[in-house]
Image: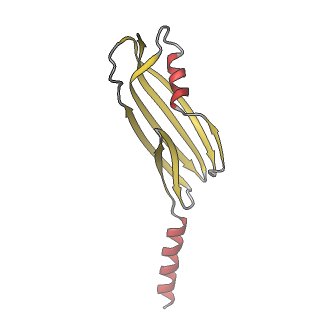
Amino acid sequence: MKKQLMVLGGVVAAVLLAGCAGVGFSNGAPVPVAAGPNFFSNVKANAFIQPAACKDYTVVKRNVTASAKLQSYFTCVNIGDISYETLKAEALKNCKGANDLVEVKMDYDMNCICGINTITAKLTATAVARK
């Protein structure tokens, strides 16, 4: 009986201490998803933003990149900005004459160690000038 209670206690402890983590998306932006205590996780995800139907543009520069970080402390304090608009502005900063992006690919990398989450977003796209 003692052995069975010890095994049952071990299973309950494992379930309570195991955390599930991933990168979820809300309106195209990543959000950390966690259930239970999350002591360690390393998750990668990506997304491709469909090109606009309008093809009335001129390519200025291919493979422009931008990256940003968001840090979350125990899901109570969040610091950083990894929004699409911020990444788009960063990518267009060095592309004189470009005013939009097409063929946009977003890569997300989420790391969590003892409740401190770091999400890194990297944008790769083609800078264009819309007419």
Residue visible at 62% across and 50% down in the picture = 75
Does 80 sit left or right of 11 as displayed?
right
The coloring applied to the image is secondary structure
The quadrant where residue 47 appears: top left
- The residue nearer to you, when weighing 47 against 117, is 47
128 vs 42: above or below: above
- The residue nearer to you, when weighing 56 against 72, is 56
Residue 58 % position (x, y): 37, 10
Give the residue furthest to the bottom: 1
18 vs 27: above or below: below
Residue 29 % position (x, y): 49, 39
Give the residue furthest to the top: 97
96 vs 88: above or below: above
Does 124 sit left or right of 82 as displayed?
left
The quadrant where residue 61 appears: top left
- The residue nearer to you, when weighing 106 against 50, is 50
Residue visible at 50% across and 69% down in the picture = 14
Residue 113 % position (x, y): 58, 50
Residue visible at 51% across and 74% down in the picture = 12
Residue 108 % position (x, y): 46, 38
Assign the C terminus to one quadrant of the image.
top left
Q: How many marks?
A: 0
32 vs 49: above or below: below
